[in-house]
Image (cartoon, coloured by chain):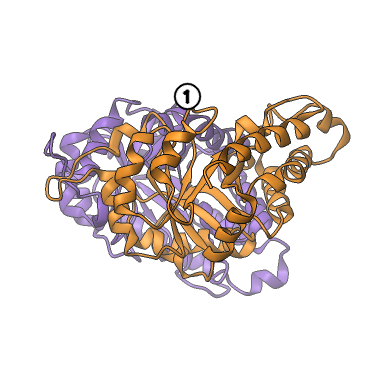
Chain colours: A orange, B purple
Amino acid sequence: MKRADLVEQIFTKKSFLCVGLDADISRVPRHLFDTHEDPIFEFNKQIIDATAPYCVAYKPNTAFYEAQGVAGWISLQKTIEYIPKTHFIIADAKRGDIGNTSRQYAKAFFESMPCDAVTVAPYMGEDSVAPFLEFDNKWVIVLGLTSNKGSSDFQFLKDTQSGKLFYQEVLEKTQAWGSIDNLMYVVGATHPEKFEEIRQIIPDHFLLVPGVGAQGGDLDGLVKYGKNKEIGLLVNSSRGIIFADEGPQFAEAAAEAAQSLSKRMAAYF
Amino acid sequence: MKRADLVEQIFTKKSFLCVGLDADISRVPRHLFDTHEDPIFEFNKQIIDATAPYCVAYKPNTAFYEAQGVAGWISLQKTIEYIPKTHFIIADAKRGDIGNTSRQYAKAFFESMPCDAVTVAPYMGEDSVAPFLEFDNKWVIVLGLTSNKGSSDFQFLKDTQSGKLFYQEVLEKTQAWGSIDNLMYVVGATHPEKFEEIRQIIPDHFLLVPGVGAQGGDLDGLVKYGKNKEIGLLVNSSRGIIFADEGPQFAEAAAEAAQSLSKRMAAYF
């Protein structure tokens, strides 16, 4: 997907919501197991049907599918193929390896599956990221400042030479590897105070923001400092939407949760 | 696998060779496509049969399987199940995410597949690594200093407070999260001059060493400074062994290449 198409969708819907498809099998409603051969796909299908009007992106988290082995990978493939082409599709896979290997991961998510973007860990540097950038209208979403507690273990180390924190170094250096048309960054909602400073480094890039909802991040704070003229944010909610209700009414509850969050988002336009 | 069993195997075979199963479909011998429904699995099966006497570990690289979609994941599962239980099995997957997600990756490789170890990127910190350590006799192999060119982009940043390089910080800090019985580190053979200093930080941990062969790493240098009293090294070769010959004699050629490398290793005992 081109940036212009993503931006247009955001302004048309007045929403920058990304729904995280973390289909944890232990929380998928039980009745789907009695009635469907692939309950995970059926769950996702109903979630997608119910939430599509309120969101602009979907983010399947590969871990929840891989945990189910081959069957899970089949559910993942079917889910990604089911997502409407109007929506931006993010494989939240946190991949990254030496060049010849990252090229294979790029094939996995951009050719074998029709994803628009894949999340990539920056630890291994440029040749681990670059192969993902060779695909037209496909995106790399580099981990910048993550939402979890462990983000403080290494991301805040301060480089002696530049005086910058490690995650700032990542934002600065990786920018040169792509453009605002094929690079985004993960910045966790649990660090709202950092968005202002992050926007000084990368004013124009889209940010994928996890951590609103179950992880406790604050929407107001991150929008205040994180929004740019194209909005420039994809705010993700996973558990808060897809497991809003774990019974037979799960899809309606997910629609309500997504609508509620998107209404809050509309107020920022 | 327990550390004692791995060490025993190494001393019995006088080999610390790990064979990397990077089954690049474009290099798998053509005749296998005519004769087998799952040519990637058949390729791996013959490679494993041919090299098992000379190596102590196998390391399938998940990217090469994921690039083939569901069929690839099936080949991966079959390959991992085929590897003899005598051998240490490493899923070279470079995973790592927030705690609830890393737990799913751990299930994928330790429950859904019978791997002994999985490689993990440290960027997201402790809660991204810890879930892998909750499994008995299973291992995390944390990226320390990688073998690729991009390793210099971030791994050599120097922390102001500790005066340590970023990869040194990773080695120091992550040690406390596990023990020499469930933690190893990736240290690339392309940095042989670093092994001495790395052994000062982690004298007793096993190191998984990629980069010998196609990537140009030097075995003598890394063994000189990297070996400890239990050997403490798993030196990986992928392309140099599995694609030693890309014709019908590929398995014999792989056996020769593996035997040749293991003979060089025997000299260090």
Q: Position of residue B106 (x, y in %)?
A: 52, 34
Residue drawn at (32%, 52%) of the image: A171
- In the image, taking residue A75 as reference, residue A18 lies left or right, namely left
The residue type indicated by label 1 comes to Glu
Q: Position of residue B72 (x, y in %)?
A: 63, 56
Q: How many marks?
A: 1
- Looking at the rendering, which quadrant does residue B2 occupy? top left
Tell me if residue A73 comes above or below residue A174 in the rendering.
Answer: above
Residue drawn at (76%, 28%) of the image: A29
Tell me if residue A29 comes above or below residue A202 in the rendering.
Answer: above
Chain under numbered label 1: B
Residue drawn at (52%, 61%) of the image: A106
Tell me if residue B113 comes above or below residue B31 in the rendering.
Answer: above
- In the image, taking residue A224 as reference, residue A88 lies left or right, namely right
Camera sees residue B143: no
- Looking at the rendering, which quadrant does residue A153 occupy? top left
Estimate how packed mark 1 is, as few (under 14), some (14 to 19) or many (20 or more) residues with alpha carbons within 10 Å: some
Observer-nearest residue: B57 or A85? Answer: A85
Q: Residue furthest right?
A: A35
Q: Position of residue A14 (x, y in %)?
A: 60, 49
Q: Quadrant of the C terminus of chain B?
A: top left
Observer-nearest residue: A30 or A229? Answer: A229
Residue designated by label 1: B134
- In the image, taking residue A82 as reference, residue A59 lies left or right, namely left
Mark 1 falls on what kind of element? helix
Camera sees residue A141: yes
Q: Position of residue A253 (x, y in %)?
A: 74, 30
